[in-house]
Amino acid sequence: MKVLVTGSAGRFGRSVVTALVSAGHEVTGVDLSPGDPGACAAVLPADLADAGQAFEVMARFRPQAVIHLAAIATPFGRTDGLTYRVNTQAAFNVCQAATHSGVQRLVVASSPTVIGYGAPGGWAPDYLPLDEDHPVRPWNAYSLSKAAAEQTMRTFARAAGDRVRFAAVRPCFVVAPEEWAGAPTQTGHTISDRLNDPALSGQALFNYLDARDGGEMVERLLDALPEIPNGEVFFAGAADALAREPLAGLLPRFHPGTAAAAAALTGADPAFSTAKAERLLGWRAKRSWRTELVDLT
């Protein structure tokens, strides 16, 4: 298929592009800072928060499928108003331009932060591990923008019917391949830092995802879209937690009130379940910090 990947130069986008090209797709990228096009056939710098540019991109490349990853990617890096406006407007514009341009399949990137962990007033889950049925409780502009992007996706899915197949992915803390060898992560810390100081990963419930596993999941989802219910949402995370100790003991240290729910987690179990992706897509993450982390000592 001809696939358009927005945010193609990002830590997640690069691996998504690689997975799609490896599966035989012709991939075009869109990124405000394209840099090295990598495996993309072409990369166009465009501001997708501008409706005209979003429509122009679709008209120029005429993709059959779109993977929308472009966004302000982390909370609190920009002003709240800018984060919310850019992320929600880009999601709306991409969905609208895609459906008006004959796109058949569209995947939108969301975030696990929609669940609401880290809220200043405290947070406790209804149950653990968290799955896609758990209520969303966004509390900042970033998580609210991602919850809005999911609702935008569902709205367009209802309007388009089976003419366009939609889904959303909630990728956990994405770890690019070079970060296993000591390159800084998106927070500026290394993976070893996050393992050695649980407070660094504690607020995010110790979630993570190797970018290559994420790319493979998106490729699998793109292929499965015609066969699964329209408008589904999927968590994408590693099969274990980014922690040296079991979460049953760690989570209550950083999220008081989670002890009862965390007792359901044993051994290296993560806080996020990917059982839905395994059931509907046949996908399960293959890589773990235990297999990928380079010992630099």
Image: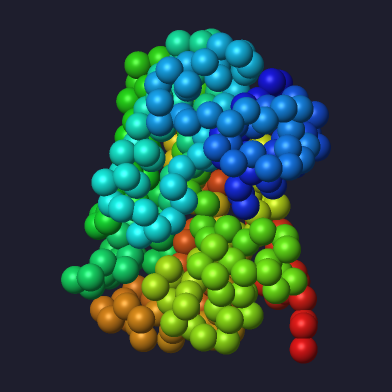
Residue at the spot x=32%, y=78% of the render?
255
Q: Is residue 60 left or right of residue 50?
A: right
Residue at the spot x=31%, y=68% of the render?
118
Say if 110 sits above or below 128 in the image.
Answer: above
Q: Residue furthest left?
A: 121
Q: Is residue 200 left or right of residue 196?
A: left
The quadrant in which the N terminus is found is: top right
Q: Closer to the camera, 279 or 78?
A: 78
* Res. 147 visible in picture: no
Q: Closer to the camera, 76 or 122?
A: 76
Q: Closer to the camera, 84 or 275?
A: 84
Say if 227 sits above or below 258 in the image.
Answer: above
Figure quadrant of residue 105 = top right
Q: Position of residue 156 (x, y in %)?
A: 37, 22
Q: Position of residue 60 (x, y in %)?
A: 60, 13
Q: Position of residue 155 (x, y in %)?
A: 33, 25
* Res. 261 visible in picture: yes
Residue at the spot x=31%, y=53% of the render?
79
Residue at the spot x=44%, y=82% of the render?
199
Say if 175 sits above or below 44 in the image.
Answer: below
Q: How many marks?
A: 0
Colour scheme of this structure image?
rainbow
Q: Position of residue 188 (x, y in %)?
A: 54, 70
The quadrant in which the C terminus is found is: bottom right
Q: Is residue 251 left or right of residue 213?
A: left
